[in-house]
Structure formats: structure tokens, C-alpha cells
Amino acid sequence: MQLSLQTIELAHNRIKPYIINTPIKSNEEINHSVGSDIYFKCENLQNSGSFKFRGASNAVFSLNDEEAYQGVITVSSGNHGTALSLAAKNRGIKATVILPSNATQHKRNLIKELGANIIECEPTVNSREKTLLYHQKKTGATVIHPYNDYRIMSGQGTIALEIIEEIPDLDIIMFPIGGGGLISGNALAINSISPNIDIIGAEPELANDAQQSLRKKELIPSKYPETIADGLRTSLGSKTFPI
């Protein structure tokens, strides 16, 4: 599978029964202060609390019956784990979320309430990967990566379809960049439908691996990201970077 406008449109049709077409809001004070009309796509009001639910839902409902029977598994200390748990619950399949030992109790409670199985690992990349590999082999579950997966990118790209349908004459659309799943899917959709719209990616100054990677034209992971925006500490993926 590759990412395309068709996969994004198919994703939108697939997940429509489960997602919220979130509202687009504007604020007069902000508009006045910057001298432009600014709009916010309120994905904080999405089911599970973030845009991650779009990609997770598309990945889960893309599985065939045999794959679905084996369930899904992921590593996440953020919103992807919650989103995948809810998507799996909606389809009635098993979900396993590998959480680092330093994950917040609030996040644990959310995932447990959604019926997913939690497996703890040490908060290191090596421990996460080893734990994921072991339990995937043990259960046969399908790994759903938080961002480095075309099914995830296609689901996230449905945001652009809704934005352009509601406000087609935008000049710029801006997206935060962590692993790149959000901006990849949406950039492809925007360039396919409305190529005159400029796309800007935003990331913390001290976690700017996307900027460095683009400048050097190769993937440069962010080794020591320093930012309170914990969702943006993730480095770009091998599939998101080329897009």
C-alpha cells in the first residue's frame, strides 16, 4: 500500500460512522492581532480526544476478518494508545498497548476503561521494540504504528478533506510535526485537491528534526528533544519523511 488521495478518500468513507467532523472555529481577537482570518480545526473534540482516532480507526477497519480476529498491538505513551483502544472496541476486537513504566496513571486508566490489555516495559527504545516484537509473535496481532503506517496517514489526511470542503479558499494550512503522520496525509490531500494552498509544518525549536532532515535531505532523528510539547518529541518516520 502507498499513500494517495484515493486511500485518503477511502479512509474517510470507512471511518465516517465513527469519527466526528470536528468544528472549525475562529476568534476575532486573534484575527485582529495578526491581521488575518485564522481558523482552528478542533480535533481536541474528536473521539478519544485527538486526531489520532482517525488514523487508528482507518487501520483497525482496514483489517480483514482473519487479521481482526488476532487483534492489534502498539507501543504508545500518548494519544495513539487511547485512540487504538477505542477503535478496537468499536470493531469488537482485542487491543494490546505496550506502555513505558513512566506513563501517567491517567493514560493507563483511559486505556483500561476502553478494554485494552496493557503491558508494561522500560522507558527505552530498545525495551519498547523488544517487548513489542515478543508479544506480537506470541499473539499474532497486527502492529499498528502510531505514525509510520500508510493506513494511519490516510486516516489523518481526512482532516484536510473536511477543512477544504468547509473553507475552500484558504491561503495556508499549518500542522504540528512529531512523527509526521498528520502532516504527511494532509499535505498529500491538500496538494492533490487545492495545490494553491501553502502548507507549513511547525515544530519546537529544540525538537526540530524535521527542519534538519529537510535541510540535509536525509532522516536526522532528534536525540535529545527539549520541549513541553511531549507529542512533538517524536522523530520523523522512514515512511513519513519522503512525503
Image (tube, rainbow, N blue to C red):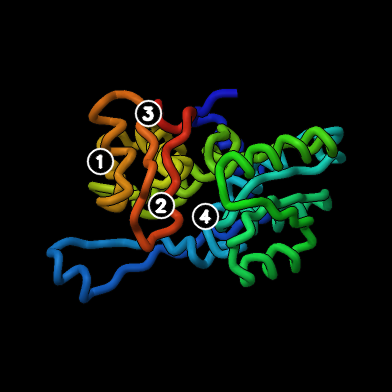
Q: Circle 1 — which element?
A: strand
Depth check: give the residue in front, 101 or 149: 101
Depth check: give the residue in front, 129 or 212: 129
Q: Earlier in the sequence, mark 1 or mark 3?
A: 1
Quarter of image, res 90: bottom right
Between tags 1 and 3, which lies in front? 3
Q: Circle 2 — which element?
A: helix
Q: Earlier in the sequence, mark 1 or mark 4?
A: 4
- The residue that appears at 79% across and 56% down in the rendered structure is 117
Q: Earlier in the sequence, mark 2 or mark 1?
A: 1
Mark pair 4, 2: CA separation = 14 Å
Whether residue 237 sits left or right of residue 59 in the image: it is left
For label 2, the residue is 232
Residue 84's spot in the image, x, y percent? 67, 52
Mark pair 3, 2: CA separation = 16 Å
Q: Which mark is residue 198?
A: 1
- The residue that appears at 81% across and 43% down in the rendered structure is 71
Q: Earlier in the sequence, mark 3 or mark 4?
A: 4
The amino acid type, in three-letter code, at marker 3 is Leu
Q: Circle 3 — which element?
A: loop
Could one spot residue 180 in this view of the protein?
yes
Mark pair 2, 1: CA separation = 21 Å
The amino acid type, in three-letter code, at marker 4 is Phe
Residue 65's spot in the image, x, y percent? 85, 36
Between tags 4 and 2, which lies in front? 2
Mark pair 3, 4: CA separation = 25 Å
Depth check: give the residue in front, 203 or 174: 203
- The residue that appears at 14% across and 65% down in the rendered structure is 34
